[in-house]
Image (tube, rainbow, N blue to C red):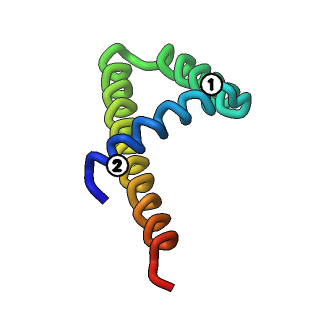
Amino acid sequence: MSDNTFDILERLMADHLDTALHESTEYKEALSAANEIFEKLKMELTKEQQELLDQYFILSSETTAICEKIAYRQGLRDLFKILFQDE
C-alpha cells in the first residue's frame, strides 16, 4: 500500500477521531482530571521545573503520536492482508 493511500486514510481517521473524542464523555472527564492535576503540580514547581515539565509533556505527546501513527498503519496493513489474502 502506498504512502499516499496511508496519508488519505490517516486524514479520514483524524477527522473521525476528532469527532469521536469531542463526543466522548469518558475522554472529556479524563482530560479534565489530568489538566486539574497538572495545574496543581505546576503551582508547586519553580519556573525552571515548570519549563522542564512542559518540555517533557510535549516530547512525550509527540512520541505517543508517532507510536499511534505506526500502530494505525500496521493495523491497516494487517487488515488488508487478512481481507485480500488468497484463500
Residue at 54% from the left image edge and 17% from the top image edge: 39
Mark 1 vs mark 2, foreground winner is 2
Judge by depth and name the residue closer to the eye, 79 or 31.
79
Judged left or right of residue 6, residue 43 is right
Q: Position of residue 83 (x, y in %)?
A: 51, 69
Judge by depth and name the residue closer to the eye, 24 or 40.
24
N-terminal-most mark, 1 or 2: 2
Residue at 48% from the left image edge and 40% from the top image edge: 13
Residue at 34% from the left image edge and 48% from the top image edge: 6
Farthest residue to the right: give it. Answer: 25
Tell me the amino acid under the disc marked 2. Answer: Phe
Residue 83 to residue 36: above or below: below
Q: Position of residue 40 (x, y in %)?
A: 57, 18
Judged left or right of residue 40, residue 60 is left
Judged left or right of residue 71, residue 29 is right
Q: Which residue is mark 1?
A: 22
Tell me the amino acid under the disc marked 1. Answer: His
| Circle 2 Cα neighbour tier, 10 Å, few/some/many (<14 / 14–19 / ≥20) | some
Q: Which corner quadrant of the image does residue 23 belong to? A: top right
Q: Which residue is mark 2?
A: 6
